[in-house]
Each structure stands twice: as C-alpha cells, then as structure tokens.
Image: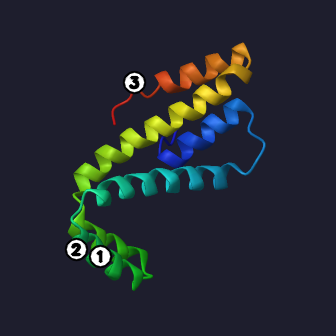
Amino acid sequence: MDKGPANVVKNVLEIVGYEGDKDRFAEEFLILCEDKVLGEMTSSMPNDKKEELAKKLSAETDPVKTLSILREYIDPEEYKRRLKSVSEEIFAAYFRQVMPSLSTDQKKQIEGYMKSFNNTPA
C-alpha cells in the first residue's frame, strides 16, 4: 500500500465516503500544508531576506529552480519537520469535523488505517 501523503489523504477520503474529486482534495490539502509551513518559516526571516526571496521567486516559473531558491533560505530538514507537524494538525482538524458524522464501521476503518502507520517503518 502506497503511503505517500496524497494517497493517505485519498484513502481516508474513501473510508469517510467523500464523493468529490479526491485527487483535487488531496492536492489542495498538500498545497495548504506547504503554504502554511512556508509562511511560518519566512515570517521569522529578516525583512531584507524576505524581500530578496520574494524577488527571486517572483521571477521564477520552473518548479525545480523554485525549490533550489527556497533551499538557499530554508533548511530542508526543518521544513520536513514542520510540514509533518502542520499536516498532522490540519488532518486532525478535519477529523474532528467529520468524525461525528461517521458510522461505527467507518470509525473502526479509520482507526485501523491510522494504526497501520505505527506498524511500518517510515
């Protein structure tokens, strides 16, 4: 079972009976998480560094080059750590919202699915 972030989101959406476009939901969820982390990490930068980064990013359209620019300003390990934390936080908020409407069976499926992450190496 592929446990990449987008697939995790889509699997949970399947369990809860989400009828919309699961691919789009997963993509937007991940973008939301990434945007929040980037916002947090850049907000603590000195203003001159923020302006310098914004100027470089505004001129770039290639995603690979954009990542390269970001790595000049943001520690990749810190980014990963924060992305994991933010994703869990946003996912937990989603669960709090939908859990009351789920059947007992759906809740058990979600619980089993989430426990499967504790039983496999990262």
Mark 3 closeness class: few <14, some 14–19, many ≥20 residues within 10 Å: few
Q: Residue furthest top?
A: 104
Residue type at numbered disc 1? Glu
Quadrant of the snapshot with the C terminus: top left
Q: Position of residue 65 (x, y in %)?
A: 34, 78
Q: Which residue is mark 2?
A: 48
Q: Residue furthest front?
A: 47
Q: Which label is found at residue 118?
A: 3
Q: Residue furthest right?
A: 19
Q: Secondary structure at mark 1?
A: helix
Residue in the picture at 60% in, 24% down:
110
104 over 55 or under it: above or below: above
Q: Position of residue 71 (x, y in %)?
A: 25, 67
Whole-number angstrom distance, CA of label 2 to CA of label 3: 43 Å
Residue in the picture at 41% in, 42% down:
86
Residue type at numbered disc 3? Asn
Q: Which residue is mark 1?
A: 51
